[in-house]
Amino acid sequence: MNHAKRSCSHVLGLAGAILTLVLFPALSIGATLTVGPGKTYSTVRAAAAAAQNGDLVLIDPGTYLNDVCLWSASNLTVRGVGPGRSYIKATNGTNYGDKGNWVISGQNFTAENIEFSGGFSSSTNGAGMRFDISGDITIRNCYFHDNHNGILGGCGNLLVENSIFEHNGYGDGQSHNMYVWGNTFTLKNSYSHRANVGHEVKSRFKNNYILYNRIMDESDGTSSYCIDIPDCGSSYIIGNVIEQGPNSQNTTIISYGAESARNVNQDVYLINNTIVNDAGSGNFIYLRSGTTAKVMNNIFYGPGTNWSGGTVNASNNYFESTRGNAAKFANPVAYDYHLTSASPALILNAAGVPGLSPTGYNLMPTMQYVYDAQGAPRTPLGILDVGAFEYGSGGGSPPDNTSPAAVTDLRNR
């Protein structure tokens, strides 16, 4: 009798497994498609046309000239296999669907280790990567430069990490290094700089986590805002080094809610950032009326109004309005704002414990940016320091060059 029961259970188990495969075929493991000289596909567009849901696409290193395409399958991972990034270079206005280099229409897409330039549209709103989906997008270790927009689009959740955005923007102020919208946006350990008239970061997401990034104009950038969150939303800006350059198109560095309060929540947390104004004057932070902001453990370096609008709960911040390096940064001329042993007691071991947001998000910085587009654990040597960098922790300074341009133009590598 026991043997019969076991046999019956075994048969039922096999039937259940078969039924599961029939009802949920998407659970099967996808194929691996290879792209490059001598590989299954010689062009990216051919692999994109062949890709099915769940596939992995591996692209050899090299330049893929005018290899623009549509990715319509879902649950795809497209990865440059290195060393170096696989380079999707569009020239002479080449584009897919009048939208840019890569257009994503399938759900849940991941791009890793890819470089994009030349993203073009006749409406001057093209992009290196463009998407408008309900699923999720992950962008990891990618490089977007010299496009109308680096990335442009909406999705459910967007994660961008360890990526570089440089010199994107048509020059009309309507195109940006990144311009995105949706539910939740996380920008982490990334380097957005030298936008052409547009913003370094523009997000209409309902929830924004801007964590441990390097966001800069530097000597020749002409961006408007360094960070623009035009429709409000719960926003966590933690552990970033942010610099407005002398050629900025707008005197405000961080703008919150300048266009609307479309997103219901109006709460901002600016914690342990180093914010630098290399322009003659300006406004470090603009907040929409009705906004509540926690501004804690930041360094404000350079001239200008610290903040305007909203209700600000401020503590443990350091202010230096002269750019005389009383903060004793390592090398502010080369945009190195790491602390030194000579940094004053108002910075070293002077931060407060930021605690939790009302929703339970831990505001304590746990990492710091490492040049370029990396991150390292932030380990306080005693009490937490003020600003984006912990003295003696993490490393990762930019190269010590006397010419800032030699530090910042990554396109010449």
Image (tube, rainbow, N blue to C red):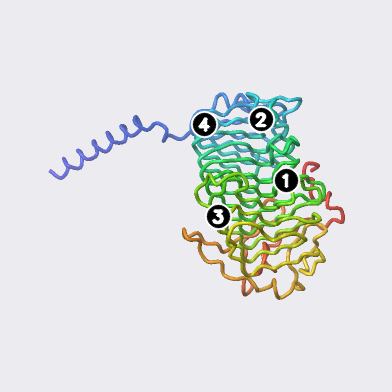
Apparent side of residue 412 relative to residue 272 in the rendered image (left or right): right
Q: Of helix, strand and loop, which one carries label 3?
A: loop
Whether 116 is drawn above or below 160: the answer is: above
**For mark 3, what is the residue?**
290
**For mark 1, what is the residue?**
224
Measured as percent of width and height from the top left, residue 65 is found at 72, 28
Amino acid type of the residue that numbered disc 3 sits on in the rendered structure: Gly
Nearest to the eye among marks 3 and 4: give it.
3
Q: Are marks 2 and 1 in contact (CB under 8 Å)?
A: no
Q: Earlier in the sequence, mark 4 or mark 2?
A: 2
**For mark 2, what is the residue?**
101
The residue drawn where x is 83% and y is 52% is 404
Quadrant of the rendered image containing residue 11: top left
Nearest to the eye among marks 2 and 1: give it.
1
Amino acid type of the residue that numbered disc 1 sits on in the rendered structure: Ser
Nearest to the eye among marks 1 and 4: give it.
1
Q: Earlier in the sequence, mark 3 or mark 4?
A: 4
Q: Are marks 4 and 2 in contact (CB under 8 Å)?
A: no
Amino acid type of the residue that numbered disc 4 sits on in the rendered structure: Gly
Q: Residues within 10 Å of mark 2 (few under 14, many from 20)?
A: many
How far apart are the alpha carbons under marks 3 and 1? 24 Å
How far apart are the alpha carbons under marks 3 and 4? 38 Å
Apparent side of residue 9 relative to residue 21 in the rendered image (left or right): left
Residue 397, which numbered label? none
How far apart are the alpha carbons under marks 1 and 4? 33 Å
Q: Earlier in the sequence, mark 1 or mark 4?
A: 4
Q: Decide which of 220, 277 is in the foreground and name it.
A: 277
How far apart are the alpha carbons under marks 2 and 1? 25 Å
**For mark 4, what is the residue?**
106
Quadrant occupied by the N terminus: top left
Q: Of helix, strand and loop, which one carries label 2?
A: strand
